[in-house]
Amino acid sequence: MLQQSSSRRAVIYTGGSLGPWSLALAQPDDYLIGADKGAFYLIQNGITPHLALGDFDSVDADALATIRAEAEETAEYDAVDKDWSDTELALREALARGYRDIVIAGGLGSRFDHSLANVQLLAVAVEAGAAAVLVDDHNEIRLLTEGARLTADDRYPYVSLLPLTSEVTGVTLTGFAYPLQEATLRQGMSLGVSNLLLADAGFISLRSGSLLVIRSRD
């Protein structure tokens, strides 16, 4: 039976780069999904995933046996027959279970194709009316289709804006070191790269398009 939630947050641990920073993300009320070896990572660190899913081609037989024994629920998919990556499966399952606040940890790593695909998955969440964010030790990435308030965060001092659609129009920034007023950002432009907040908060507004907001640190 699908669990429905409009208030709790889902945190997805995928098979990309994980570390102590990712364990610190989990809060007591979070619904924890381990995708492929992300499930084993949680279990290795004493955390029980509510749901483990994927084709589990990144873990050996012993690890898979551990996942089956320890996870509250396990969903296994055939590596050939499935059309979606394990991360996409996890995101779509979180959405299907009613979660509209979703964090994806480990979705960025050495495989640039996987990283880029996971960035594009943010559009799937937006289309479903959800807020999703990709997080690793150096980056926090979200997708905006309307205005937002950004609160200063010492972990991620730099703010970059990149269009996911061919162009984003009416981009206005207030509270930033480099403000914009009704700007149009097109793919291939670096105008929105590496900005800084001047105070405790800044504001981003736009009129059309989908805008990636990438907060980062060196």
Image (cartoon, rainbow, N blue to C red):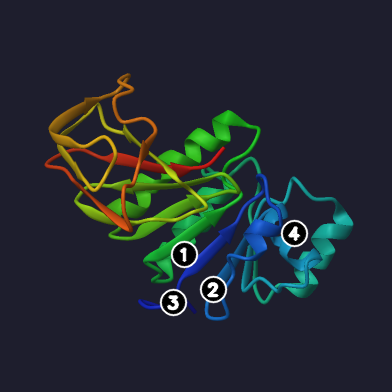
Q: Residues within 10 Å of mark 2 (few under 14, many from 20)?
A: some
Q: Is residue 149 visible?
A: yes
Query: Does the CB distance between marks 3 and 4 fall below 8 Å?
Result: no
Distance from Cα at disc 3 to Cα at disc 4: 22 Å
Most foreground residue, 190 or 83: 190
- Label 4 or label 1, whichever lies nearer to me, is 4
**Amino acid type, callout 2:** Tyr
* Residue indicated by mark 2: 31
Q: Quadrant of the C terminus?
A: top right
User: Relative to 217, is 98 above or below?
Assistant: below
Q: Are marks 2 and 3 in contact (CB under 8 Å)?
A: yes
User: Disc 1 or disc 2, which is closer to the eye?
Assistant: 2
State which tag comes first along the sequence, 3 or 4. 3
- At mark 2, the secondary structure is strand
Which labelled disc corresponds to residue 8?
A: 3
- Sequence-earlier tag: 1 or 2: 2
Closer to the chain start, of discs 4 and 1, is 4
Q: Secondary structure at mark 1?
A: helix
Across and down, in percent, residue 63 comes to 84, 58
Q: Which mark is residue 41?
A: 4
Whether residue 53 is visible here, answered yes or no, is no
Q: Which residue is mark 1?
A: 94
> Residue 205 location, x and y as percent?
17, 47
| Kind of residue at badge 4 | Tyr
Which element is circle 3 on? Answer: loop
Dot placed on the residue nearer the N-terminal end, 2 or 3: 3
Name the residue type under label 1. Ala
- Measure how far apart labels 3 and 1 are at the Cα level: 11 Å
Q: Earlier in the sequence, mark 2 or mark 4?
A: 2
Q: Nearer the viewer, mark 3 or mark 1?
A: 3
User: Along the polypeptide, which appears first: circle 3 or circle 1?
Assistant: 3
